[in-house]
């Protein structure tokens, strides 16, 4: 320490031996960045600070880097390498020798044993002296709580220090208090914290700047007992008990949201809050966490068969905790509300709920850019739900204005998909085991086989094959289903034959079929590792009718579609612009004019492809001489489809609504779908042009694979710019687009909302 600092005892160390703790930690990128910043702040003392890091044993270099990166600027400019190395050595020795060492996580050691300072007191060499003085007191202790209670009983009589308002100053160091024989509650607390740390007991300084009645401040000490923080009044022992003291009742009147009346604990961890030093009001060098709730809340009563759920919300990039409103629900019923803790609160202080054991719960967080849901099965008391999100934290701007970074958006998608998969596995395993889906009073059984193996690193293909029949008794349609199971066999992938939910003539193109197939795809992506970019529709006869109608309106879910021996009814091929589509028809299949309609579709598709470069990939085969049954010649459609993968973000979209409407198609969406509405949109670079339709309003979904979201996006209609600006990446868009389909490859990160066109 500097020469001005008093030393009660000088310890000369000829050989510095460091006893290593288990599993030496590595420095984090954040700590390395903080180290560089600290070296800059050290100014002319930079060489000393750098030497402390360089000469720290490799097994504890990360600890030294952590400490240096959090030192107050005044200490960086004055402390020597020898002082810091000595502090590290003695802290490690004390922790290693403690019987409770395995009960102290590294983060507690770093914050409550390693630091050489408690608050803003004078910087003294106290460790070796206090270890020699006080280690005999704790030799019989088997826990940090027991050791702290013994120290509080015996330290103050041993060194002859007592409370007095006549002490030289409030913020005395431990050695200053010993010299004076008198100390304030602040000085007493500093001395007890130093005594604890010297003997390997994690301890920190706690206080309230102003009692709720305005009558003054008070300081005390918290001890880590191996599981949680406990409190005691310095020089106010209560036998071997903790969490007792005259001030406990008054602390219940503390006000969490008023910094002057809250209860604060000092910390060396990152925190946006500082400890309100009443005796040095302008000093903001001591970081703090708000621990008010632990002193003011009534003890949580946990009924039999229930447990405590702890909830933590963190920023995925920085790891910092986020304060946000949260509600927890079990079976759809809200059972509690509260606010998650940010980094101004103790790291072990979590939002807490009481939840029935073995219940499935869901927690919904309200964030600046939307809501976030996360859930688990509640299996044990004190279970922690730790949720990470990409919402911006304390960056000086609102998240919905600045948006997420690309990296954070990608990480948020990954986490959202992971949560979604967990939800699907938890809630839909029974229907997959039963091989039957039920929606809105209808039931769709299904059968499937698994063929071959996908290429390394890829998911399986999925072929949904619709049977014929329709307008017939259930037994007839069921027999058609049985036939369909054996009709085709892909070389690789899941071949799935569903049984139509109804027996009507239009059994495969009613609106509920879209919903069933959406759910089926969503489930199989999770349960059978289906690649959502390798999903194919196919169908024969009435099943072909279904393909004619479903393929254009569900094209954005598919990689290909094959229509065999069906009739399109009123549908049109416009929506097939980006979907490989193959049509197989017997040349003699004249019922309902199917063969002639197929020939007309062949011409129409060729004309569409010729007039739209890159659009309408197709293959139409008329099997001349064949009737309704093509003797399996149509099976060539399966390998033809298998060559294609879904194009989920095409540069041009032609969206023609059917009588069954959808709110979303590729990267477009509408709030109020309208039957037969036609919308055509193109994109090139960061320019998007609405060529047709969309006058009633349109949502344009984007991500970094489509445009450069760090540059302005331009939207035009009739060659006029109707939007120009940055489009922020938003977790709300991520969540919304995932929930719409459960399609991990169909998640977008940004959205331009184009309002309805005004009539001139």
Image: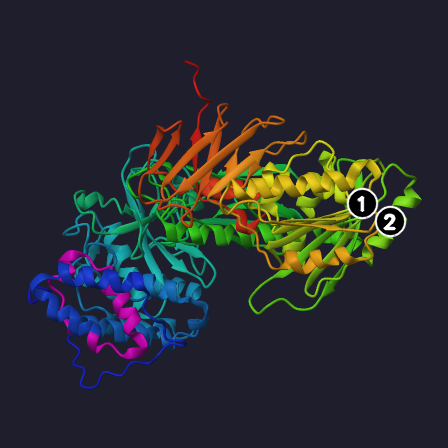
Residue named by callout 1: 541
Question: Looking at the image, is mark 2 or mark 1 nearer the viewer?
Answer: 1
- Is-magenta flag for residue 72? yes
**Can you say whether 159 is above or below 418 in the image?**
below
Q: Verify CB contact (< 8 Å) between mark 2 and mark 1.
A: yes
| Residue 377 in view | no
**Can you say whether 632 is above or below 61 in the image?**
above
On residue 364, the disc is none
SS at mark 2? helix
Relative depth, front residue between 361 and 426: 426
Disc 1 residue crowd, few under 14, some 14–19, many 20+, Cα 10 Å: many
Q: How many marks?
A: 2
Extreme residue in the top direction: 760
Residue named by callout 2: 480
Please report whichever mark, 2 or 1, sits nearer to the chain's N-terminal start: 2
Extreme residue in the front direction: 625
């Amino acid at each position: 320490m500097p020469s001005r600092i008093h030393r009660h005892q000088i310890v000369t160390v000829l050989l510095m031996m460091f006893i290593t703790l288990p599993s030496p930690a590595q420095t984090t990128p954040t700590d390395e960045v903080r180290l560089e910043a600290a070296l800059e702040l050290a100014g002319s003392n930079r060489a000393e600070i750098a030497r402390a890091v360089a000469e720290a044993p490799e097994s504890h270099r990360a600890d030294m880097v952590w400490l240096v990166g959090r030192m107050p600027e005044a200490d960086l400019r004055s402390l020597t390498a020898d002082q810091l190395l000595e502090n590290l050595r003695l802290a490690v020795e004390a922790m290693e020798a403690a019987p409770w060492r395995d009960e102290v996580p590294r983060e507690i050691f770093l914050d409550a044993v390693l630091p050489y300072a408690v608050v803003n007191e004078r910087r003294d060499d106290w460790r070796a002296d206090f270890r020699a003085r006080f280690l005999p007191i704790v030799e019989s202790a088997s826990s940090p709580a027991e050791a702290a209670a013994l120290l509080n009983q015996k330290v103050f009589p041993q060194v002859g220090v007592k409370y007095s308002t006549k002490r030289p100053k409030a913020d005395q160091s431990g050695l200053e208090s010993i010299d004076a024989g008198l100390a304030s509650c602040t000085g007493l607390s500093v001395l007890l914290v130093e005594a604890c740390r010297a003997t390997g007991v994690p301890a920190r300084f706690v206080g309230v700047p102003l009692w709720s009645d305005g009558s003054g401040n008070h300081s005390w000490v918290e001890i880590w007992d191996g599981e949680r923080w406990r409190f005691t009044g310095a020089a106010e022992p209560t036998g071997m008990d903790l969490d007792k003291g005259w001030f406990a009742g008054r602390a219940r009147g503390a006000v969490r949201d008023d910094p002057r009346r809250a209860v604060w604990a000092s910390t060396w961890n990152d925190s946006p809050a500082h400890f309100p030093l009443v005796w040095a009001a302008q000093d903001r060098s001591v970081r703090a966490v708000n621990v008010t709730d632990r002193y003011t809340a009534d003890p949580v009563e946990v009924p039999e068969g229930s447990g405590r759920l702890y909830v933590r919300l963190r920023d995925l990039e920085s790891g910092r905790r986020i304060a946000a409103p949260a509600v927890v629900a079990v079976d759809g019923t809200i059972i509690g509300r509260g606010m998650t803790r940010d980094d101004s609160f103790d790291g072990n202080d979590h939002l807490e709920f009481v939840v029935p054991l073995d219940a499935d719960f869901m927690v919904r967080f309200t964030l600046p850019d939307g809501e976030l849901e996360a859930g688990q099965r509640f299996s044990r008391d004190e279970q922690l739900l730790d949720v990470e999100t990409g919402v911006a934290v304390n960056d000086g701007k609102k998240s919905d204005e600045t948006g997420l970074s690309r990296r954070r958006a990608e990480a948020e998608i990954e986490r959202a998909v992971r949560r979604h998969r967990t939800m699907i596995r938890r809630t839909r395993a029974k229907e997959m085991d039963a091989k039957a889906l039920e929606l809105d009073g209808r039931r769709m059984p299904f059968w499937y086989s698994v063929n071959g193996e996908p290429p390394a690193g890829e998911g399986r293909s999925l072929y949904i094959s619709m049977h014929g029949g329709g307008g017939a008794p259930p037994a007839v349609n069921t027999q058609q289903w049985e036939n369909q199971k054996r009709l085709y066999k892909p070389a690789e992938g899941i071949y799935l034959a569903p049984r139509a939910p109804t027996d009507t003539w239009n059994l495969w193109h009613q609106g509920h079929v879209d919903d069933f197939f959406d759910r089926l795809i969503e489930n199989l992506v999770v349960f059978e590792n289906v690649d959502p970019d390798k999903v194919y529709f196919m169908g024969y006869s009435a099943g072909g009718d279904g393909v004619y109608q479903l393929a254009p309106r569900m094209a954005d879910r598919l990689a290909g579609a094959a229509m065999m021996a069906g009739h399109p009814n009123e549908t049109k091929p416009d929506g097939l612009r980006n979907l490989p589509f193959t049509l197989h028809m017997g040349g003699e299949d004249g019922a309902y004019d199917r063969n002639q309609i197929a020939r007309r579709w062949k011409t129409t598709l060729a004309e569409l492809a010729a007039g739209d470069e890159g659009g309408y990939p197709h293959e139409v085969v008329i099997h001349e001489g064949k009737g309704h049954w093509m003797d399996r010649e149509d099976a060539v459609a399966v390998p033809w489809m298998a060559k294609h993968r879904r194009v989920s973000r095409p540069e041009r979209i032609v969206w023609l609504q059917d009588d069954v409407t959808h709110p979303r198609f590729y990267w477009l969406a509408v709030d109020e779908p309208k039957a037969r509405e036609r919308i055509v949109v193109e994109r090139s670079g960061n320019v998007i042009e609405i060529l047709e339709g969309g006058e009633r309003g349109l949502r344009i979904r984007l991500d970094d694979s489509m445009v450069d979201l760090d540059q302005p996006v331009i939207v035009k209609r009739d060659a006029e710019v109707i939007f120009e600006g940055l489009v922020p990446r938003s977790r709300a868009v991520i969540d919304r687009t995932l929930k719409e389909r459960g399609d991990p490859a169909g998640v977008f990160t940004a959205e331009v909302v184009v309002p309805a066109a005004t009539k001139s």
